[in-house]
Image (cartoon, grey):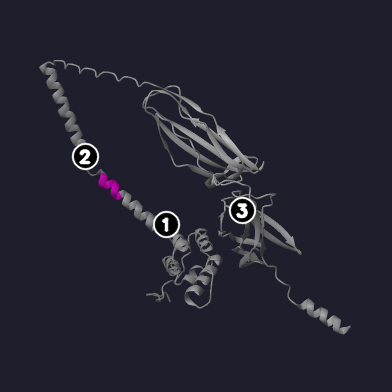
Amino acid sequence: MRKVIALLLALSALPAIAAEPFARSAIEKTDTIVPGQQLRLTVDVFAPGFFTSPPDLPLFEMEDALVTLPEERAQNLVKTIDGVQYAGIRRQYAIVPERAGSFSIPPISINFAYSADGAPTRGTVTTAMTGFEVSDANTTPSLFSAKDVEISQSFDKSLTELREGDAFVRTIIVTAKQTQAMLMPPVDTGAVTGLKQYTKPAQLADGVAAGRGETLSRRTETVVYTTQKKGEFTLPGIRYGWYDLDRPGKANATLPAVHIVVAEAKLRAAIAPEPVAEHRSLPEHRRQIALRILITLGLTGLVWMLRGLPKLILNRLEDIRKTILRSERYRLHVLRQTVLGGELPAVYSALHAWAVSDGFRTLRDRVADIPELSNEVHELERMLFSTHHGYFDRRIAANSLSARARPRKQMNNSPLPELNPSS
């Protein structure tokens, strides 16, 4: 009995196992997956406490598949496991398989920072390998898979009041759901004899709001037509093919043919004869000459008085530029840019110069009252001056700089004693 009690006491004295972050992923569930269909891979990252920097989800490659990370807002999650509350962040990848067969999604390694029991911690989690099957839907390479495909067109002017040489603009918009704009094929507008046409580069957009929280992708094509002769013409109808995911099978979105009437160009008006100059009397002629001389002298005097104005303006602009360069705000801006994108030795030199310019003897003294920046400076020094591996978070360091008010000058910052001490 004593041994059992001793064993229980020993077990109770052992430290509790710390909660660890973890990640999980899941591919979107659907009855049938066909080539060209966009799938969503949901990735959830959980950490005890709260995140101090968002998870950095990397792009990964898959053979015969297009993988993107849409610019969508991340979703915050909360989960309690064994009495421990976890904060979670959810992001979604978009995956478009280009062929039928089996696909494997590789493990995804994700870096982030979080706070556990008040201590800043860096974490790395890896998702499990998963996969999916793509069936052969007998789709052709010219088709793409999507839902709710719609096509529309508009013109910038009436097509029944044109004349030879006139130009008009045709705008065609294709929208679709559960696909990406880059996968939507161009619209075949055909060609019409008697009309010269020029097609501008297409405009692509994803994540366009469609109401009720839904989004769609959009392809906008612009065609400029120029009439070359009079007559009646017809822009052929358009048939835009796609693979319908709602009703599995091939479908078409269509536009009707458009009738155009071009009239003969208007005749140019004849050149009007130049008016005969009126005979002016001698006194009137002299007055006009005198007036012109006075105007010329006045303009000359004005130019002479303003001759120094450009130099004065340039000197003033130069003074403003120097003031901006000497300002603390500009120095902090340059320092933040160096921290975010410079080489590590250059970053450390810039931070040290900043500390000296603020009246501090060392960089350590300067960041002593900025805990976040002090931690990052410590990590930077470990990476530069020791064999230990550190992790310098540029964003945290830059944000610590931007959030800091004007520094307090250290007293007695000179290493030399006072010239005339009071006592």
In the displayed structure, 3 sits above or below 351; it is: below
Residue depth check, mark 2 versus mark 1: number of the one nearer the observer = 1
Sequence-first tag of 2 and 3: 3
Q: CA distance from mark 3 to mark 1?
A: 56 Å
Callout 1 amino acid: Tyr
Query: Closest to the observer: 198 or 373?
Result: 198
Query: Closest to the observer: 169 or 356?
Result: 169
Q: Which residue in the structure is indicated by mark 1?
A: 330
Query: Closest to the observer: 178 or 349?
Result: 178
Q: Which residue in the structure is indicated by mark 3?
A: 100
Q: Judging from the image, what secondary structure is the residue with disc 1 in? A: helix
In the displayed structure, 7 sits above or below 72; it is: below
Q: Judging from the image, what secondary structure is the residue with disc 2 in? A: helix
Callout 2 amino acid: Met
Residue sitting farthest toward the right: 1
Q: Which residue in the structure is indicated by mark 2?
A: 305
Residue 287 place in picture, x, y as percent = 14, 21
Residue 239 place in picture, x, y as percent = 55, 35
Residue 284 place in picture, x, y as percent = 14, 18
In the displayed structure, 284 sits above or below 27; it is: above
Left or right, 398 with reference to 39? left
Q: Quadrant of the C terminus?
A: bottom left
**Which residues make up the magenta segment?**
310-315
User: Residue placed at 50% from the left, 77% from the top?
Assistant: 386
Is residue 281 found inside the magenta-colored segment of the image?
no
Residue depth check, mark 3 versus mark 1: number of the one nearer the observer = 3
Sequence-first tag of 3 and 1: 3
Residue 286 place in picture, x, y as percent = 12, 21
Residue sitting farthest toward the front: 138
Q: CA distance from mark 2 to mark 1?
A: 37 Å
User: Residue placed at 51% from the left, 74% from the top?
Assistant: 382
